[in-house]
Image: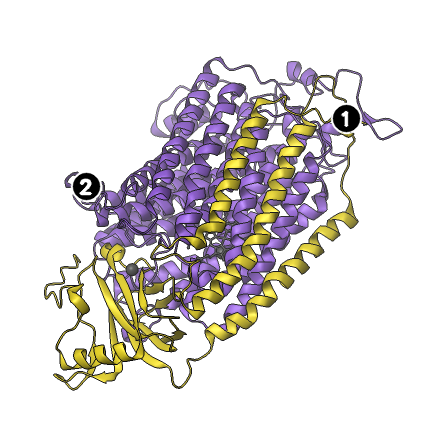
Chain colours: A yellow, B purple
Amino acid sequence: MRMTVSNLRLPRPRSAHLLAGIFLLILIALVATGCIGGTDTPQNTLAPEGEVARHQRNLFMLAMWPALVVMILVEGAIIVTLLRFRRRKNDAVPKQTHGNTPLEIGWTIVPTLIIIGFVGVPMLPVLFDLGRDPKADAYPIEVTGQRFQWSFKYPNIKDARTGEPLESPPVTPGRAAELHIPAGKEIALTLTSIDVNHSFGVPRLAGTQDAIAGEHHRFWMKADHPGSFSGQCRELCGVDHWGMLITVIAQSQEDFDAWAKEAAAGVKQTPEGRVPSAVAATGSGD
Amino acid sequence: MATEWPQTRRTGLADALRGAREMADQHYGIWSWIAPVDHKRIGVMYGVTAFIFFLAGGIEALLLRTQLIVPNAGVLNHDQYNRILTMHGTTMVFLVIMPLSAAFFNLMTPLMIGARDVAFPRLNAFSYWVFLAGGIFLNASFFTKDIFSGELGAPDCGWTCYSTLSSKAFSPGHGVDFWALGVQILGIASLASGFNFIVTILNMRAPGMTLFRMPLFVWMTLVTSFLIIFAMPVIAVALFELIFDRLFNANFFNPDKGGNPLLWQHMFWLFGHPEVYILILPAMGIVSEILPTFSRKPLFGYPFVVFSGIAIGFMSWGVWVHHMYTTGLGTVANSAFGISTILIGVPTGVKVLNWMATMWGGSLSLKAPMMFAVGFVAMFTIGGLSGVTHSVVPSDYQQQDTYYVVAHFHYVLFGGAIFALFAGFYYWLPKFTGKLLDDRLGQIHFWLMLIGFNLTFFPMHISGLLGMPRRISTYSEGQGWDIWNMLSTIGAFTIATSILIFMINVIYSLRRGEAAGYDPWDGRTLEWTIPSPPPHYNFEKIPVVHARDPFWHEKYTEDEQGRPIPVVAGAANGHPDEAHEEHGGGHGIHMPSPSYFPLIAALGFPIMATGLIYDYALVAVGAAVLFVGIYGWALEPATEGEEA
Ligand code: HEM
Ligand SMILES: [Cu+2]
Ligand SMILES: [Cu+2]
């Protein structure tokens, strides 16, 4: 039979080399993917600094590694098949095999079980945990998406000048609106929009959730430690969608309280003048 | 009919029209393009038109990629970027992949089932004209602003056109009106062809061709056609609501007046997910024809592949919420749809295994069609796997609306559908041109495209995981995205180069390509039993089918050990039909007469749509044109010969 190993004459076809080369490149790229978690870029979805993002990273890895293995097996098998069964001179017409029902039933059922067992089942508890209502003592913040900026309202902080809950100052597109939160504490966010759909994405803390006009979408997140975390709008919302940026500033409880006090008194709305306060003309271009 | 050169002496208008019709009937002159009924002619028209749109969509893609090559580039402004982005997506889905699939439905279905034409040839022509009208109408939107001063009038809401961004308040101008009405028109074309192919496949198979002897491509055409006729009405309703909101101040999606913007997302994706299978199933069908031919083995597990195709067709209705995980529908909805999405990966995976088993143990001829088909399997697998990774709801909260999703759907749509469609070109074009495409150029095209494709889209997995949102017109440095974007842009131009090579190949081969003959690939199915190009009646004698892969069984028998041996009488290389060719020549075969009424009827739609936007009087005009077209069509005799 031609299928024996002795017949496995390898590298005749040049194109097969090329294919193998590409395969190698993809492999390297994939290893790079696996290592992405190590890079400290501002919106890295695989470098969590909060509980929600950590759950998400872990689940992704759970799905990605088997997917990678399957991919390497399939691509490898394709290459082996091409090399091994490439038509040669005087090839006889191969036997006409029409299928193999038990085999096919097997390769339908086994992957189903694997995929449900490895990914489907572990996903559920996390899904319910991330989707639960925020705890009663979580720190509340109301997030409003608006073309083309985010604004944050702190129901627990009263603005001394207006007597209303404190609101973040407006920013222009390309400048990040700042959200202050206490680190290590669960934050209860309520998302809404006053115009079109936006999506509040802060990868290193929590991924993204949509802000939709007429809806009040609640979810929670938590920062492990003080720090500042970048994010931006993820849902196309118009010309300056690119520039609807977010910076979440997590502070220790003392720092946060101090900031809240100052902000409430209208002393200083942003730390160290990172963002020019209240640029009146928002010039959003619409 | 279809016999004599027209000899009419023209006296009146009626005679002139009659003459024109006869010219069309004889397959020559301009009229044969205006009043086509031949499925092959219409298929070619579909293919050429869709390819032109492919070039347009490709140029749009290059513009987008050029803007993103470095951070803060100034090639396009934000407004231009969003509009070109919207047109790119809409074009590729509705004006390229769907009509290219339709081109293959048209070209191949009748030939593969042993029929002389489709069930409703004029409806077929109508479908083409409506598609063309819709495509031109959609692109006309570019010109609704002063394009020469850089202002584009095209829609700016993305191909998904979510409410409330799509409302008059947030997308003023006429771009979105053109989008909604244009897609609506295209839906009519799809519906017409969907019904046509269902009836054709169910009713017009050659004697002996039972459902389970049908070629896989025909099966996939059937499943796709059913998906089309169920999915299109869903988007049609959504589009009508959008049009009412925009033009007549209705409030379907307006939250201020009790409407609900999420309603749009539900309807869009209830259509949208079946739609992605409308885009991929024909590709799977094409590949399921090519792999067996070039492996010289039948498709491994034919019933499995058929049933998994059908299963996908059903399951595709139960996963739409995976596009809406982050909208806050609640954990129960998200879990249910998360599980169903994970499960839809299974029938898809089964097909991949069947294709691999088809090749295993075969005698693989690695000509260009085969390379593209193998490329399809290899690339589609990656897209399917990334699909499974982001079907995991909580982790998709991270990937939603990032470049990771862009990578996923390009692996399935470009690595999948487009690779398979090119495989189809290399495989079947010779049947219709009579000339083989050059294999060397084909190989260069393949390798360049494969490299360019991976260079473009693989890095998007990484930029996506690094948090780069999709649909942003620019980005700042320091995010770790720069290098990946640079690679993607270089890859995009590599792809463009490969497409140029393909075009050169087509032109070169049309002029001096090798003659294809009946059966250049040692084919297995009925289309290879007739000449290339086929006579307009396709089959001199309607074939009688005794097995799956009927032509193969005509060419090969099996010895006692089940090994195939060529039938001696030269049938394997010569041709059974060849003998008839001399005397028969198709005299006396009744074919439907050409008709220009479908064209007239189709013209009614863009006129009405323009009227809705600019002046209601035009709506009446368009309706009148449509009515005249349909009226004439309805009363026209089916064939010229039956007239008085
Ligand atoms: C293995 C089966 C598949 C699975 C499990 C799957 C899963 C998914 C999921 C979960 C999403 C949503 C991602 C997000 O927006 O966060 C998605 C998006 C998408 N998928 Fe798939 N998919 C599969 C196959 C396909 C196929 C065959 C096609 C088309 C040929 C396709 C085309 C798309 C497109 C176009 C989008 C993005 C739509 C948009 O937001 O513009 N997918 N897929
Ligand atoms: Cu946005
Ligand atoms: Cu989907």
Q: Residue furthest left?
A: A280
The vertical placement of B509 against B243, above or below, is above
In this rendering, do the residues under marks 1 and 2 share a single chain? no
Residue A243, percent from left and from top: 24, 57
Q: Which residue occupies 44% across, 17% down?
A: B508
Residue B595, percent from left and from top: 44, 34
Q: Nearer the viewer, residue A259 or A68?
A: A259
Residue A6, disc: 1
Crowding around mark 2 (Cα neighbors within 10 Å: few <14, some 14 to 19, many 20+) is few
Can see residue B574? Answer: yes
Q: Which residue is mark 2?
A: B147
The vertical placement of A2 against B93, above or below, is above
Q: Which residue occupies 71% across, 17% down?
A: A89
Disc 2 marks a residue whose amino acid type is Ile
Can see residue B2? Answer: no
Beta carbon at label 1 within 8 Å of ligand 1: no
Tell which tag, 1 or 2, sits nearer the viewer: 1
Disc 1 marks a residue whose amino acid type is Ser
Question: Label 2 is found on which chain of the structure?
Answer: B
Q: Is residue B105 left or right of residue B60?
A: right
User: Which secondary structure, mark 1?
Assistant: helix
Beta carbon at label 2 within 8 Å of ligand 2: no
Quadrant of the rendered image containing residue B546: top right
User: Which secondary structure, mark 2?
Assistant: helix
Crowding around mark 1 (Cα neighbors within 10 Å: few <14, some 14 to 19, many 20+) is few
Quadrant of the rendered image containing residue B55: top left
Question: Label 1 is found on which chain of the structure?
Answer: A
Residue B355, percent from left and from top: 65, 40
**Considering the image in quadrants, where does the N terminus of chain B appear?**
top right
Callout count: 2
Q: Which residue occupies 13% across, 67% down?
A: A277
Residue B250, disc: none
